[in-house]
């Protein structure tokens, strides 16, 4: 017989993270956004940056952008509604690498964006460098 923990009436289960992983936001990308810990892989950074776009966290996006390619200003469209992230491919980007590539599709209301992003380590932390838009 399985046993389930009772949930107070009217309370909802914690929502999964916007990045698509099943963990709650606070236990997933939220811990990177708060600055308490750095993303351990290029894919984790990609997922956390997607979640930052969903949440409108310009500060995190700026902090995790390579200083060489970071724009002077980043303005997000408040009407943009991101709906789903799919990781299509990863190359390197682990604790054993200095660079990595993550290809993804980010869906939004009305369309999708596909990008092959490059990441590098700066002072040990993963940062976004730039991306190409494959056809």
Image (tube, grey):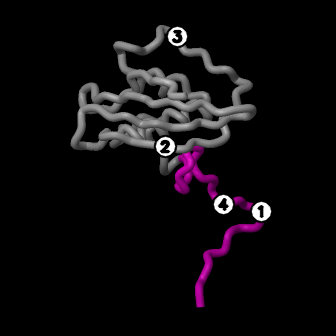
Give the Cα distance between marks 4 and 2.
29 Å
Residue sitting nearer the eye, 35 or 71:
71
Q: Please tell me whether residue 8 is drawn above or below residue 89 in the rendered image.
A: below
Q: Earlier in the sequence, mark 1 or mark 2?
A: 1
Q: Earlier in the sequence, mark 3 or mark 1?
A: 1
Residue sitting nearer the eye, 69 or 15:
69
Q: SS at mark 4?
A: loop
Q: SS at mark 1?
A: loop
Measuring 74% from the left and 32% from the top, which residue is drawn there? Answer: 110
Q: Quadrant of the N terminus?
A: bottom right
Q: Which residue is mark 1?
A: 10
Q: Position of residue 35 (x, y in %)?
A: 41, 34
Which dot, 3 or 1, sits closer to the camera? 3
Q: Which mark is residue 13?
A: 4
Measuring 38% from the left and 22% from the top, which residue is drawn there? Answer: 129
Prevalent SS, magenta region: loop
Q: Which mark is residue 73?
A: 3
- Crowding near pointer 3: few (<14 within 10 Å), some, many (20+)? few
Q: Where are the magenta residues, as a range?
A: 1-25
Q: SS at mark 2?
A: strand
Q: Position of residue 2 (x, y in %)?
A: 59, 86
Q: Which mark is residue 100?
A: none
Which dot, 4 or 1, sits closer to the camera? 4
């Amino acid at each position: 017989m399985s046993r389930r923990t009772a949930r107070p009436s009217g309370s909802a289960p914690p929502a999964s993270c916007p990045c698509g992983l099943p963990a709650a936001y606070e236990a997933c990308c939220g811990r990177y956004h708060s600055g308490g810990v750095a993303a351990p892989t290029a894919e984790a950074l990609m997922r956390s940056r997607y979640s930052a776009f969903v949440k409108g966290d310009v500060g995190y996006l700026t902090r995790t952008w390579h200083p060489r390619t970071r724009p002077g200003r980043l303005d997000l469209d408040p009407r943009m509604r991101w709906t789903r992230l799919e990781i299509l491919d990863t190359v390197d980007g682990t604790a054993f690498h200095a660079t990595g590539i993550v290809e993804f599709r980010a869906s939004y209301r009305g369309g999708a964006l596909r990008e092959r992003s490059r990441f590098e380590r700066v002072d040990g932390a993963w940062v976004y460098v730039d991306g190409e838009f494959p056809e």
